[in-house]
Image (cartoon, grey):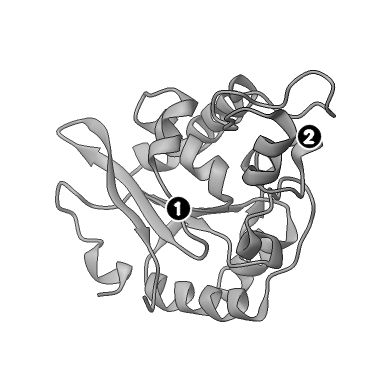
Amino acid sequence: MAISETTGHGPNEPRVVLVRHGETEWSRTGQHTGRTDIPLSQAGEYKAQLVGDALAGIPFGLVLSSPLGRARETARLAGFSNAQPDPDLLEWDYGGYEGITSAEIIERRGSPWTIWTDGVPPGETPGESAGDVSIRAQSICDRIEPVLEAGGKVLLFSHGHFLRALAARWLGLEVKDGSLLALDTASISSLGFEHGRRVITGWNRVPGR
């Protein structure tokens, strides 16, 4: 079932649709990709088009995208070339951990590690803290609020870690709680309201899978 077939006016109506960009070579190999502008792979381009099929016909009042090419190209291939770039939708800045995998980071540190709680330690090129990402996520929530209050829908094209952090903040949780929300490339998720409370109405749906 296409997302466009589930957007009526019931209590679980999606109001904010989140799209993680399509596959890149670095996402395929598990390398942390923050601000490096890696292009979509051929598979990523194909899946971006499937995202467009799933979203066809939904009247979005606001469409935003991370300024990075992999997100903007996903938006374009999905049929949303009008997406407005917003730097607050950029991926987590991994600093000195850019381009390497979690396994390599753990080997370098000699101890368990996760970006959600450990960040980038002193001695490495500084990146963003969870607090930094939380500020950006809240900024997005503030920007889309007028559209939602007017009854409109919002579409956001962004990145894995940031969208997970954004969903956590939408729910009133801490950014680190985004670690509980796995998110694949070219996936569609949605946020909304139930009985006046912010909820997740759909998560990590990959068209064609």
Q: Residues within 10 Å of mark 2 (few under 14, many from 20)?
A: some
Q: Which residue is mark 2?
A: 95
Badge 1 amino acid? Leu
Q: Residue 113: x and y, percent? A: 59, 31
Q: Secondary structure at mark 2?
A: helix
Find residue 44 and report its image quarter: bottom right
Quadrant the N terminus occupies: bottom left
Q: Residue at x 35, y 51 (%)?
A: 190
- Taking the spot 71% from the left edge, 29% from the top edge, the residue there is 109
Marks 1,2: beta carbons within 8 A = no
Quick check: 146 left or right of 162?
left
- The one nearer the camera, 99 or 84, is 99
Indicate which disc residue 183 carries: 1
Residue 126 falls in which quadrant of the image?
Answer: top right
Q: In which image quadrant can residue 71 be found?
A: bottom right
CA separation in Å, label 1 and label 2: 22 Å
In the displayed structure, 178 sits above or below 69; it is above
Q: Amino acid at mark 2?
A: Gly
In the rendered view, would you say 12 is above or below 4?
A: above
Q: How many numbered discs, if any?
A: 2
> Residue 167 at what x, y percent from top left?
42, 38
Q: Indicate whether 70 appears above or below 150.
A: below
Of marks 1 and 2, which one's residue comes earlier in the chain?
Answer: 2
Q: Quadrant of the C terminus?
A: bottom left
Residue 203, x across and y down, in percent? 33, 53
In the rendering, which numbered label is found on residue 51?
none
